[in-house]
Amino acid sequence: MECIEVAVRGALDNLQKQTSRSFVIYGEPQSGKTEMMICLTAKLLDEGHRFIVHLLNDSVDLLGQNLGRFKTSGLAPAARNFSEILDPSVPVKTGKHVVFCKKNGSDLRKLRDKIGQVDKIIIIDDEADYASPNAKVNSGAKTVINELIESLLGLNGIYIGVTATPARLDLNNTFKNDSHLWVDFPPHPAYTGQDVFFPLEGTPSYSLQLLPNSGDEPKYPRSALFRFLVNVAYLNNYVNEAEENYSLLVHTSGNKTDHKSDWSVMNTSLNDLQDPSSSKYEKYVQEIWQTINDRYKDADADELTKYILRNISRNSILIINSERDFSIRGAAATNPSSLFTIIIGGNIVSRGVTLENLLSMFFTRDVKHKIQQDTYIQRARMFGSRGKYLRFFELTIPNALYADWHRCFVFHRLALDAIRQKMGSLVWLSDRRISAVAGSSIDNSTVDLNRGEMSFQLFDYSDDIDTLVTSDESSIAIMEKLAKRVGDGAFPLYLRKYILRMLHQGAASLAFHPSKSIEGYRDANKELIERDKGLIGQSDLQKNKFPRAIHHFKIFHNAGGKARLFYKLEGSIQFLKNVK
């Protein structure tokens, strides 16, 4: 697949240049990174690398899921769990090895003690932003996992971090990774991700059910359950050639009491539907019938209702509170074995594990505190290859939480667009409700928290560009004409769409300022048109001329005829930049 070739080729180019021993491969959540890592491993073995360690989150199910895929891929040598090589009779100083290990202190110590210092070892770290960064970076100490991974790397090991949320790796300077060498793993053509589930414009192509921001009335999860039953019934009677099992993920807080409460609502409702003598039976059957009648005009509501009642006992409710729960029930959760599978859990089901045939997600509670981008991006378990049943997928979520989640992906997308343009010096966005990463992971010695601007791809400069941005046309018209003139790389489409959504004062919210030469700045990189302290100052904002503007654009150019567009957003938005 072409997207895998792009990532593998980019990684190998980095290794051949030998300019850095640490970089990141980033790709969308659930976009096929495991398959990419299989191909990368095979290519590394072909290139002569003899010892490759794959690190995974401390999850039994994730280890089994990924190791199983590697073993069935035909890779030679076959991938092995680290425990398979611990016996003293297993030689590791010779031959080629592909070893899997969970990111916990005990397992990593055993692996290190077994293999010692392996010359030019390669570590491929899946979900690299989780556990691997040094959360003690500002105290002069190191976290256990970070120190053990560094010990495995030794003096000449190579670290390749793989993740959908790379901000922490950049802001933490994890293993001194070089953001100029980061490799993009583009999603495959069948991928459904943030553009589908959090569109900037238009109506979603799936079912989005927004809940009030407060209140935990049982009617909300119960109605979501009934809609899930209806969608499964319709798919199996009107769409699928053969019957398939599906799952509903109920995402709660981390409180086990909440898990029990949600289980009670689901379990009681399912039991009532199995008992015609229940006082709720007729009411619930009528609600299901009405849901079918309202949603699917082409369906026989009576027959689909009968299908649900006839099969309602084919259900299972899995509460995932811990890794032990996942190790016991994981297979049934990741690939539903019951027609109607309900998974109830919090953070334990939020990262890394792929949930096959996930048809519905229900978020029970709003988040009262600030949310982290990396955490909530990883919670988008609905991303992946959902195309064949996308229009039947349903997300039920409090209105405020969806708005925060949506904005979280806007911030993430803006940052990723800059990475894809090989900007190298990256900018991450946060506001009062959304933080880029946990504060403890930010290396305060190199990260500027108040730079306040973003920039994009270099482009060829000429005087007609300044004539355009200083013209009397409306700022919206200038934006579109400038984008057409310099291209999407220099003025990303995604940013323009975001700005059009955020023009609360109309065109007056957007300002374009006269272009300026960078040659007068002694502390700037004039070739790349960059400056650690930023380039847009208060005087550049022209407050007298643009008193209501919050979106500011200014072009800086050099003597060589190159230019770069800079964007500054005023307000509560904070821009984080690593200026190492």
Image (spheres, rainbow, N blue to C red):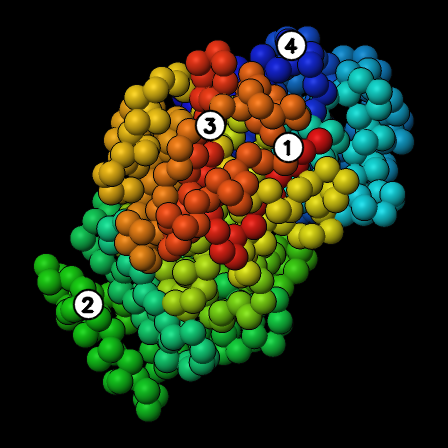
Looking at the picture, how far across and down is residue 198, in whole percent? Answer: 36, 50
Q: Which residue is mark 3?
A: 516
Neighbour class for label 3 at 10 Å: few (<14), some, many (≥20)? some
Point 21% across, 49% down: residue: 239
Tag in front: 1 or 2: 1
Q: Nearer the viewer, residue 93 or 224?
A: 224
The quadrant holding residue 154 is top right
Q: Which residue is mark 2?
A: 292
Residue type at numbered disc 3: Lys
Q: Secondary structure at mark 2?
A: helix
Separation of marks 4 and 1 at Cα, in angstroms: 26 Å
Comes first in the chain, label 4 or label 1: 4
Circles 4 and 2 in contact, beta carbons < 8 Å: no
Q: Which residue is mark 4?
A: 17
Placement of the C terminus among the 4 image quadrants: top right
Q: Which residue is mark 1?
A: 532
Neighbour class for label 2 at 10 Å: few (<14), some, many (≥20)? many
Q: Nearer the viewer, residue 416 or 74?
A: 416
Circles 4 and 1 in contact, beta carbons < 8 Å: no
Looking at the picture, how far across and down is residue 103, in whole percent? Answer: 73, 42
Separation of marks 3 and 2 at Cα, in angstroms: 62 Å
Placement of the N terminus among the 4 image quadrants: top left
Q: Secondary structure at mark 4?
A: helix
Point 25% across, 31% down: residue: 481
Q: Secondary structure at mark 3?
A: strand
Comes first in the chain, label 1 or label 2: 2
